[in-house]
Amino acid sequence: MLQVSGPPGRPAFADAAVTMIAGFANHAALALEIAEHRRGAEQLLLLGDRDRIARDLHDLAIQRLFASGMSLQSVLTQFADRPQAAERIERVVDDLDETVKVIRSTIYALGLRDADGEAGLRARLVAETGRACAVLGFCPALRMTGLLDTLVPDDIADQLIAVLREALANAARHAQATAVDVAAEAPVTQLRLRVTDDGSGIDPTRTRRSGLANLHARATELGGTLTLTPRRPTGTTLEWTVPLPAGDG
């Protein structure tokens, strides 16, 4: 809608002026419609790219990692008399399994959308950690496990995102960290968020910690807990855990 007005007491707009204004409104409406179609086309291209990336990750990366893990496991018996070498191979196999989980989480985050068009919790976690890159000066590592989009209700998901935002902001403002790891897990009965940094740790001289008080309040309101533990050799691990409501899934 285009609204045009003139000073009080002035004559009404002439027919020529009304025609010109109507023409301008038509042109503006056409430009907006073209822009909307262009945005729709760009969104389709983006979704197509996401689908392609997800397929490539699944068909190429995951299959090769799985095959590599199987090959390593098959040679373990040859190192029965060398326990140190066998232990190292087992650690590599475990790392490959963990990498497969991370890639699968990325695939879910790329392709997942709710029926109403809103992003699921996995996609929201990816977006929130992505927004923190500029503030931190680097991008946090993100790992997601469990049925985050299926088991976590919207109100708890909103609280989780708020807690993650505050934790990342604290790491940027106070920790002077050079690396931050974020892990979100939903093992059926509870939701756990763990944020670990390699910064300077908690300053014992700081008595005003309103941000941490807010995180603690968000946990207790949902019947959960907030813990802060030192990370060795430096840094802090924040763990926010709340129970998930029982349901039919």
Image (cartoon, helix red, strand yellow):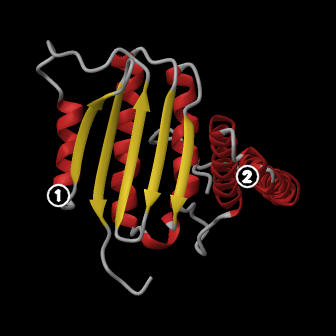
Q: Which mark is residue 25?
A: 2
Q: Residue at x 41, y 49 (%)?
A: 161
Left or right, residue 137 beside residue 227 = right
Q: Amino acid at mark 2?
A: Ala
Crowding near the residue tagged with mark 2, few <14, some 14–19, many ≥20 C-alpha atoms within 10 Å: some
Please indicate, yes or no, whether residue 196 appears anywhere in the rendered image.
yes
- Asked which secondary structure carries label 2, the reply is helix
Q: Do residues under tags 1 and 2 come within 8 Å of each other at their CB atoms?
A: no
Residue wearing tag 1: 221
Number of the front mark, 1 or 2:
1
For the residues labelled 1 and 2, the Cα–Cα distance comes to 52 Å
Residue visible at 34% across and 70% down in the picture:
189
> At which x and y percent is residue 203?
22, 15
- Image coordinates for residue 83, horizontal then vertical, percent: 63, 40
Residue 19 visible from this viewpoint: no
Give the residue furthest to the bottom.
248
Q: Is residue 104 left or right of residue 208?
A: right
x, y (%) of residue 63?
A: 84, 58
- Name the outermost residue toward the left: 207
Please state which of residues 109 and 84 is positioned toward the viewer in this rendering. 84
